[in-house]
Image (spheres, grey):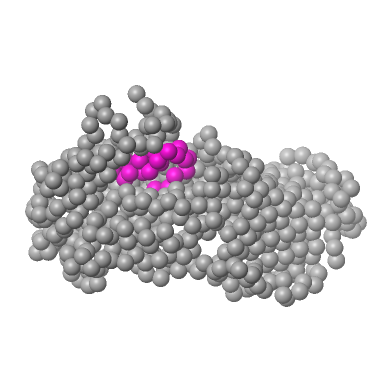
């Protein structure tokens, strides 16, 4: 049976709709028979807009959805209307066991477990809106007619508020304006507005999704082959293997925005293994519109060849492409690649950060930071209990560590770290090829043998509702990139960050790009900032989400 939204309903339904209905009752009935039918086919158009700060993204296009029980087939075609004109076509098939996604532009497909809960497709939102558990309140705004298929269809316009949005864990403050046909309760138009609970929400970002239905069918036969995925000729499969190892699982859990679908484990060098070097390499990663890293660079490294191995591995990663990507860059983020020995050693290098002294009144064409060429671990006997410490140092023009001293408080751990770093050696930092002194900080953690490390990702909280905001204690001003200085480029880079219970910024994701290498400089600087952590009402330190604007101005 084919039902057009503008068709004439039965006299019983018409009489029922003419009784002044309650908004809640209308919402529980919205979607009509199509919301509960076993087989459904829908077609229409959809547009979305995301606004954060002074930046906005818009796209619009068409969709075709077929549903049979737990099986779905959704075909979409969208065009970015601002700031570019990138087109994205995608096919999603759920066969009851697996979900298949195919991106035509990249000619890549993925296989996931079938979703267990409500989906965020057009029918999933309608079915979700009928559930009283998610409904908060609503009211009838007015009555009007909408033209469809050459017919004028009377409808109620209802506004509602919901506690969440299906299939979108980051949506808060969810509101909906829906046009419901008076004759049969079918949805003619559906507008969802919500705040993004993360980077966009904290900078007053808003998202709006508008769906207009052109045709609806239900209780019709649908061929079984419609829900079978056939890989197109020449396509390749990207498998979601991010949890194949603890190192990849840790990296994937820290990513914000980008969705890792395939990861390659970095190799540890023989030199690092022999030295007992464990630690984290922090990478700056730009993800292209095809889901592949287009730029990977080390921001905080370890030396002994591990930085190059981390870069080489992440260059082979793939991420889930997203439609409508401006400038062919869909995400800019930091990726922490961890190296751990088997069996693990007690000492772990959390981070190494260096700033090279820049000469006055000299044109700067290239700055290279120090890299460790000789490493010695602190004394294992000093690590009697899990703890953290850090040292500050100067790397001289010959690469020798100078003035090594505790960065924070003294103690057994700090003494062991200072003694170890005094024996290190580096290739010195350079400016335009000439060796220069550099100032740096090395952070360590230690864990005695047998003390099991907790690797589960920690929940990040939003500020408010009993969660206090972090307070900045110290900051490092970002350096200007050579490219931006030459071009006299200025502006603001907006970063999403998570402030840990230790007061460190991590899991950084660029939500407003500045370019010219300044986003990387902003990320490098913020990773060195220190905060008093956000806390619960009882004083427990927790991980808190925040956005940070880093301004670049030439004097």
Q: Residue at x 9, y 64 (%)?
A: 381
Q: Nearer the viewer, residue 80 or 20?
A: 80
Residue 454 occupies quadrant: bottom left
Answer with the quarter of the image where residue 8 lies. bottom right
Magenta-colored span: 508-531
Say which residue appears at 36% left-offset and 51% top-offset. Answer: 297
Q: Is residue 101 above or below residue 194?
A: below
* Residue 462 visible to an observer of this rendering: no
Q: Residue furthest front?
A: 433
Q: Quadrant of the C terminus?
A: top left
Res. 452 visible in picture:
yes
Q: Is residue 325 left or right of residue 362?
A: right
What is the tally of numbered marks visible in this picture? Answer: 0
Above or below residue 423? Residue 368 is: above
Residue 303 pos. (x, y %): 24, 56
- Pick the residue in front: 372 or 335: 372
Image quadrant occupied by the N terminus:
bottom right
Residue drawn 52% across and 39% down? 52
* Left or right: 157 as drawn, with respect to 386: right
Lateral position of residue 222 relative to residue 103, left or right: right
Magenta run includes residue 521: yes
Left or right: 236 in relation to 67:
left
Residue lying farthest to the top in this orientation: 555
- Residue at 65% in and 72% down: 230
Query: Residue 521: image x %, image y %?
Result: 35, 40
Q: Nearer the viewer, residue 469 or 380?
A: 380
Counting from the top left corner in percent of width and height, residue 384 is at: 12, 63
When asked about the image quadrant of residue 95, the answer is bottom right
- For the residue pair 139 and 542, the one nearer the viewer reads as 542
In the rendered image, residue 354 lying in the magenta stretch gets the answer no
Q: Position of residue 231 (x, y in %)?
A: 63, 71
């Amino acid at each position: 049976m084919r039902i057009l939204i503008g068709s004439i309903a039965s006299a019983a339904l018409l009489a029922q709709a003419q009784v002044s209905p309650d908004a809640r009752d209308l919402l529980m009935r919205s979607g009509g028979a199509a919301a509960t039918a076993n087989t459904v086919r829908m077609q229409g158009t959809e547009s979305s807009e995301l606004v954060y700060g002074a930046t906005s993204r818009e796209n619009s296009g068409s969709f075709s959805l077929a549903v049979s029980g737990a099986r779905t087939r959704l075909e979409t075609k969208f065009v970015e209307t601002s700031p570019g004109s990138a087109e994205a076509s995608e096919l999603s098939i759920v066969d009851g066991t697996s979900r298949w996604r195919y991106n035509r532009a990249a000619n890549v497909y993925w296989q996931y477990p079938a979703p267990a809960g409500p989906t965020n497709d057009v029918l999933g939102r309608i079915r979700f809106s009928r559930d009283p558990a998610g409904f908060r309140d609503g009211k009838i705004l007015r009555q009007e007619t909408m033209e469809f298929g050459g017919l004028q269809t009377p409808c109620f316009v209802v506004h509602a508020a919901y506690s969440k949005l299906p299939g979108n864990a980051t949506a808060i403050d969810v509101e909906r304006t829906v046009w419901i046909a008076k004759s049969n309760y079918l949805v003619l138009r559906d507008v969802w507005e919500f705040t993004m609970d993360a980077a966009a929400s904290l900078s007053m970002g808003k998202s709006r999704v508008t769906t207009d239905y052109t045709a609806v069918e239900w209780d019709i036969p649908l061929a079984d082959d419609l829900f079978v995925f056939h890989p197109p000729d020449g396509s390749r499969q990207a498998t979601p293997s991010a949890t194949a190892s603890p190192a990849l699982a840790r990296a994937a859990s820290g990513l914000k925005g980008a969705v890792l679908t395939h990861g390659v484990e970095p190799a540890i060098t023989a030199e690092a293994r022999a030295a007992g070097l464990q630690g984290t390499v922090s990478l700056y990663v730009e993800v292209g519109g095809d889901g592949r890293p287009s730029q990977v660079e080390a921001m905080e490294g370890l030396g002994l060849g591990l930085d190059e191995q981390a870069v080489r591995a992440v260059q082979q990663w793939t991420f889930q492409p997203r439609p409508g990507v401006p400038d062919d860059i869909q995400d800019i983020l930091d990726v922490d690649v961890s190296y751990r020995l088997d069996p693990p050693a007690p000492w772990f290098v959390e981070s190494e950060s260096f700033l090279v002294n820049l000469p006055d009144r000299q044109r700067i064409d290239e700055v290279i930071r120090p890299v460790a060429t000789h490493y010695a671990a602190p004394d294992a006997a000093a690590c009697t209990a899990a703890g953290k410490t850090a040292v500050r140092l100067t790397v001289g023009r010959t690469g020798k560590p100078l003035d090594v001293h505790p960065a924070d408080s003294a103690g057994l751990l700090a003494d062991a770290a200072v003694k170890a770093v005094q024996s290190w050696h580096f290739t010195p930092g350079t400016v335009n090829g000439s060796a220069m002194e550099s100032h740096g900080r090395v952070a360590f953690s230690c864990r005695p043998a047998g003390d099991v490390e907790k690797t589960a990702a920690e929940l990040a909280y939003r500020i408010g509702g009993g969660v206090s905001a972090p307070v900045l204690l110290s900051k490092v001003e970002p350096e200007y990139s050579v490219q931006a200085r030459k071009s006299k480029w200025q502006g603001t880079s907006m970063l999403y960050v998570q402030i840990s219970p230790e007061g460190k910024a991590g899991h950084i994701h660029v939500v407003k790009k500045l370019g010219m290498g300044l986003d990387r400089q902003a990320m490098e600087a913020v990773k060195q900032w220190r905060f008093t952590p956000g806390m619960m009402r009882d004083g427990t330190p927790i991980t808190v989400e925040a956005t940070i604007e880093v301004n670049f101005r030439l004097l």
